[in-house]
Image: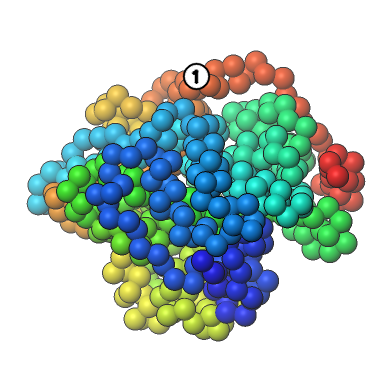
Amino acid sequence: MRYVSTRGSAPELGFADVLLAGLASDGGLYVPETWPTLPPLAELRGRPYPEVAVEVMWPFVAGSDGDGLDRASFEEIVAGAYATFDTPEVCPVRPLGDVTGPRGAVPLHLLELDRGPTLAFKDVALQLVGRLFDRVLGARDGRICVLGATSGDTGSAAMHACAGRERVDIFILFPDGRTSEVQRRQMTTLGAANAHAIAVPGTFDDCQDLVKAAFADAGFRDEVRLSAVNSINWARVMAQIVYYVTAHLSVAPDGGPVSFVVPTGNFGNILAGWAAKAMGLPVERLVVASNRNDILTRFLSTGTMAVSEVVPTTSPSMDIQVSSNLERLLFERLDRDGAALADLMARFRADGTVSVPAPVLAALRDEFDAARLDDESAAAVIRSVLGRTGAVVDPHTAVGIGVAEELVGDGVLSDPSVPVVCLATAHPAKFPDAVEAAVGFRPELPGHLEDLFDRPEQVEHVPADLGAVEALVRAELRR
Ligand SMILES: *Cc1c(COP(=O)(O)O)cnc(C)c1O
C-alpha cells in the first residue's frame, strides 16, 4: 500500500514511513492511495478480535516486509497489543435497551472502548502504534524521542504504549494541577525509565506551545530525533477501523446496515467509521456527537466552519475547536484534489472561517448527521442509563447516548431494523467528579487499577521555558 498526502505535494510513502512521519511534509495528512475491500463479513464472524484486526488492517500494512512487518510479525504485534486489554473480547458490545421513535422501538448498543490500560478508546490505537514503532525502528536501527502535551487522555495512553519500548523515549508535558488525579497517576506511576511525566506550571496551551517550540527548533529536533503520536497519525485511524467491523458483526448477524454515534473531538474516531464504510461495511448513518464545543455540528448544518472560543465542559476530551482529521474526509469529498484542499485549509487558517461548496456539503450530509448536548443533559443521560440498565457511563459516552436518543425521536435514526451503536470512549472512573455530580457516588476503578492511589508517583517539574524542557530531555534521553 502507498500513501498520498491530502495536500497533494508531499512524496508518496509506504506504511512504515507514514507511521514515523505523522504529518506529511506539505502540512497535509497521509491517506491510503485506494481503499481496500473488507473480506466477506461471514468469513470474519465468530473469530477472535486480534484475528479480525489482522484481516482488516493487513492491506494497509502490506509491502513493509523490509521494515520488519511481514504478516507473521504483524500478527504477533497485534496479539500483543490487545492482550493488554482486560477482556479477550477487547472491545465488547452490550445492549443499552430500546428507544421508542416514530416508527417503533430502535435497539441501542454500547461499544465498550474503555477496556485498555488507561481506560479510554485511545488505547486501542496507541497500544498498537507503540509496538509498531519498536518493530520498524528495530529494522532500521533507529530511535525516536516522542514529545507531547496532554490535557489528560492522550498523554496517559501514549505513555503506557511507549513505556518499556526499546527504541522509543517519551516525554509528556501536562499542566500542573489541571488534570484529574486518575489521569495524573496514570502518567506518574508507570515506573519505566523511558517514560517521563513532566509537570509544567500553566495551562494545556502553555504545554502545547512548549512542544511546538521544541519541534520548531530544528537543531534540537534532529539531535534527539523528535517525533509525535498525535491523532493525525494514519496508523491510529487504521487501528480504529477494526472495532466498527467487530461491533457490526455482533449487532447485525444478518449483515444488514448499522448506524454509529460517536462522541467527537478531533474527528479521528468517527473518521475510522467512515473508512470502514468506504471498505464496504454496511453503515447507514455516522453521527457526530458534540458537547458545547460544536464546530462540527455547526459545520454539518451550515457548510461553514468557523472557530470560536473553547468552553470547558464535563467532557474535556471533546473541548476542541479545530478537528484536524476532518481534512481526510474533505479530501475525499473534493475528489482527492489536493490543491483545492490546500487552498481551503489556507483560507480557514487565515480567516478562522471557511465554507464548502453546496454539493460538497450535500455529499457530507448524505452520510453524516450531527447534534450537540450540554453538560446538564449529559448528566441526565448518566442518571437515566443507570436507572434503565444499571451501568454507569462516562460524560463523553453520555453525550453520544443523549444524541442517539434525540435522533431516534427526531426520525433520523428511527428505522427499527437498523441497530444503533453508541461508542463508549472512556471509563467513568476517569471522570469521577462529573459522574458523582450526576449520580451521587464515585465510580470504582477496574481491578487492574485498584491500587492506583497507592503506587509511588514519579514526576519531573520544569518551568514553562523551552531551554529548561530541552535540557531535561537531553539529560534523560537514552542514546
Ligand atoms: C479523544 C477522546 C474523544 C474524541 O475523539 P476524537 O477522535 O478526537 O474525535 C472522545 N472521548 C474521549 C474520552 C476521548 O479521550
Q: Is residue 212 above or below residue 442?
A: below
Q: Is residue 101 left or right of residue 65?
A: left
- Amino acid on which the number 1 mark rests in the picture: Gly
Q: Is residue 231 above or below residue 364?
A: above
Q: Is residue 52 above or below residue 92?
A: below
Residue 276 shows in the view:
yes
Residue 184 shows in the view:
no
Q: Residue at x 53, y 41 (%)?
A: 76
Residue labelled with disc 1 = 447
User: Between residues 103 and 410, which one lies in front from this camera angle?
Assistant: 103
User: Between residues 325 and 389, which one lies in front from this camera angle?
Assistant: 325
Quarter-of-image position of residue 23? bottom right
Q: Quick one: which residue is furthest to the left in this view?
A: 103
Q: Percent from the top left, x then y, of residue 381?
A: 33, 37
Q: Residue at x 20, y 51 (%)?
A: 255
Q: Percent from the top left, x then y, of residue 326?
A: 48, 65
Q: Percent from the top left, x then y, of residue 170?
A: 73, 43
Label 1 element class: helix
Q: For disc 1, does the CB lie below 8 Å from ligand 1? A: no
Q: Residue at x 55, y 84 (%)?
A: 339
Q: Is residue 357 left or right of residue 328?
A: left
Q: Percent from the top left, x then y, of residue 441?
A: 43, 20
